[in-house]
Structure formats: structure tokens, C-alpha cells
Amino acid sequence: MNRDDPSGPAPITVKPPRDYRLDFFRGLALVFIFIDHIPNNLFSYVTLRSFALCDAAEVFIFISGYTAALVYGRAMLREGWIMGAARIYRRVWQLYVAHLCIFLMYNAEVSYTMLHFNNPLFADELQAGAFLAEPTETLEHVLLLQFQPSLLNILPLYISLLLIFPLVLLAMRQHMLLALAPSAALYLAVQIWRINLTGYPGDSTWYFDPFAYQFLFVIAAMFGFARVRGMVVLPAWRWLEPLAVAMAAIGVIVQVSWTLHDLFSLPALVTVPLWADDKTTLPPLRILNMLALAYLVARLVPQNAGFIRSAPGWLLVLCGQNSLYIFCLTILLSVLANIVFTLIGNALIIQVVVNMIGFLLMLGLGTLLAWFNAGGRLPARPAPDGETGA
């Protein structure tokens, strides 16, 4: 049987070695999320969103889809679909509880600041006013993931994507197109009719439209599931690499143009219509740019690249391996940073201190969790041999 035939029986292969590129770039995405969540943060001019048509949110969703297929796809092939689905929903429950805990701590930060510094603007800026004004009525919408204050919208998106993931894996096991075709159709419907889930309060909707982001998630999961089944992950078409380079270059030109416009009021060289860059509906330009970057990383960055094995790189790997805990910390740190900037200003020295403290706390927590998970010792960095691309 052809091992690349997606419709044949799924071979259960030996678990491949861990790809630390996934952990590194997920850890880097978490750092970028922390930076980008702080308003008027000069450090945001060196994050991905200043050089690409996508940002850390798309990176996080893409890597999450890929790793979800690796972990739960392998579990499904080894233990059956029911057990695989059970493992997915166990993770959904963990994410749901984490979201509620972060929501409570988030609002505790905001309400404490409002009471002690007599500044009601925090509730408006962080979109927590509805809960603080009417907590009883709002609580129901919190539990239903409809009420999503500023910064608290990625975990509900991830939860919604995992809720349907057992069906996605079941379809992929039969044929990749059984998962991709309905996903693409749903994504197209979003682009045409702007369908979305209902939010709260009023007639608001989800900031990250799950009907749109599921397409990127499913695409990434296809690559992850292909790896589980021992199939060719990346096609060897010669034109793909120059096309990916061109797409990435377009992103750089457009975003750098707008970055220079924001910093120095220079005329923007290229303008992008709002509908083409709307983060909520994830328009095709953002997906194509994300896929181009992922392809170039997979082709050009070795699995044991030197910068990943370096001391700073390995700290990011440890953060990426404990992404849920680090992500929750970034939310709380971003709120604190916003409060600090509002109360004492955002002079350059203050921004440097606040950002550096945030980085150190994130890296410290990642190291501590890795030490604990390894039984009281830090995981060893991978050896430099075997540096090959995807």
C-alpha cells in the first residue's frame, strides 16, 4: 500500500522525536502576545505584527492545530476514537477552568485599581465594565464564553476549536478532504456573510470568529495528522518556496510601510483595505501570509537549529512547552503593565523596565514548570547533530 494514500488504513508508527521548533515559536508567540497586549508599547514595533500580515494570534492557532493533531491524532490511532475524543474534552475542561480563573483574577486587578486609584477608565479600556456593573446578569454570559473582555478572547476561541476537533480527526482518518472541504466552505461563508457567534453585551460578536479561525486550525491539523500517519508533510513542488518568499515579502513591505507611517508619519507606500486585514474574520491575506511563514520555517529552519539550542532559545522552548500557564501569566502581566502605564506614564525607561520584568517572569515560570515536570531537574538541551529541515 502507498504510505501516502490518505484513504487507506492508518499506520501506527513509532513516535517521532520532539520537534523543538514548535515549542520555540509557540514560546516566542507568547512573548509577542504579552508585548502586543500592552497599549502604546514601543516594543510592539519589533513583534511579528509589524513585519507581516498576520501576528502572534495566528501563529498560536496554527501551532495549536498542528500539535493537537500530533497528540490527539496519535491517541486516536493508538486507543480508538472514543478515547481520543475523551482526551480532547479533558483538555477542553482544563482550558475552560483556566479561562474562568483568569477572568476572576483579571477583574480583581481591574476592580482593585479602580477602588484604590479612583480611575473608572480601567473598566472601559479593558472592557470589564459590564461585569463590574452587573455581575449577576453578566456571569451567565461569562460561563457561556459570550462575555470576553479585552485580552480574554483567545482561550474561548481555542476551546471552541477543540470542541469540534474529534469530528475533524474522524474525518481526516477517512480522507483529508472530508475535513478540509467543509472547513473551507464554512470559512467562505464567513467571508461572504460575516457569520459569527453572539457575544455580550448588546449585539457584540466574538473578536476572533471561530467559524473563520477553524480553517487555519484544520489546515495546520492536516499537516500534523499527516506526520502522525507517516505521510509526506510538505510537497516538493519547486514553485512553492519562491511563492512563499514572495508572500512573506509582500507582508514585510506592507507592514513596514505602516510601521514607519506610525512612527515617523511617513506616507504609507501600500494601503490595504480594511476588509482585507480584518482580524476578526481572518481574511485570505492573513491566512496566506501565515502559511507562507510556516512553510519557510519548516523548509529553512533545522529542527535542532543553533538559536533553538542556545540558552535564550531554550528558555523560550520551556515556555512553549508550558503554554497554558505562560499564556495565563501574560494576560495578568499585560493588565498590570497597562495599569502602570496609565498611572505613572509610559516613558521609554518605564517601558523597558516593565517589559523586561514581564519577560523575566515568563521565562522564570517556564523554567520552574519544566524543572518540576522533569522531577527536580532541568531538561537537557538537544544535541547539535541531526540538524535537518522538515
Image (cartoon, rainbow, N blue to C red):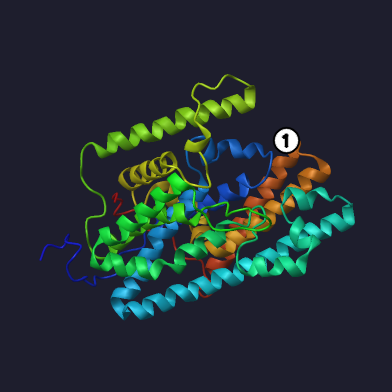
The furthest residue to the top: 267
Give the structural element (helix, strand or loop) at label 1.
Answer: helix
Q: Nearer the viewer, residue 80 or 227?
A: 80
Query: Quick check: can you spot residue 169?
Result: yes
Horizontal arrangement in the rendering, residue 247 relative to residue 353 (left or right): left
- The relative height of residue 389 versus residue 144 in the rendered view (above or below) is above
Residue 37: x and y in percent read: 64, 47
- The relative height of residue 74 versus residue 235 in the rendered view (above or below) is below
Count of all numbered marks drawn on residues in the image: 1
Q: Mark 1 belongs to which amino acid?
A: Leu
Image quarter of residue 172 = bottom left
Image quarter of residue 146 = bottom right
Query: Quick check: can you spot residue 52?
Result: no
- The relative height of residue 313 versus residue 322 in the rendered view (above or below) is above
Residue 3: x and y in percent read: 15, 63
Horizontal arrangement in the rendering, residue 153 relative to residue 228 (left or right): right
Q: Nearer the viewer, residue 357 or 222?
A: 222
Q: Nearer the viewer, residue 309 or 36?
A: 36
Name the residue rendered at 41%, 59% in the picture: 65
Image quarter of residue 371 = bottom right
Horizontal arrangement in the rendering, residue 367 relative to residue 100 (left or right): left
Name the residue rendered at 20%, 45% in the picture: 236
The residue at which mark 1 appears reads as 348
Residue 183: x and y in percent read: 36, 56
Name the residue rendered at 78%, 64% in the picture: 134
Report crowding for label 1: few under 14, some 14 to 19, many 20 or more residues within 10 A (C-alpha): few
Q: Quadrant of the N terminus?
A: bottom left
Name the residue rendered at 42%, 67% in the picture: 164
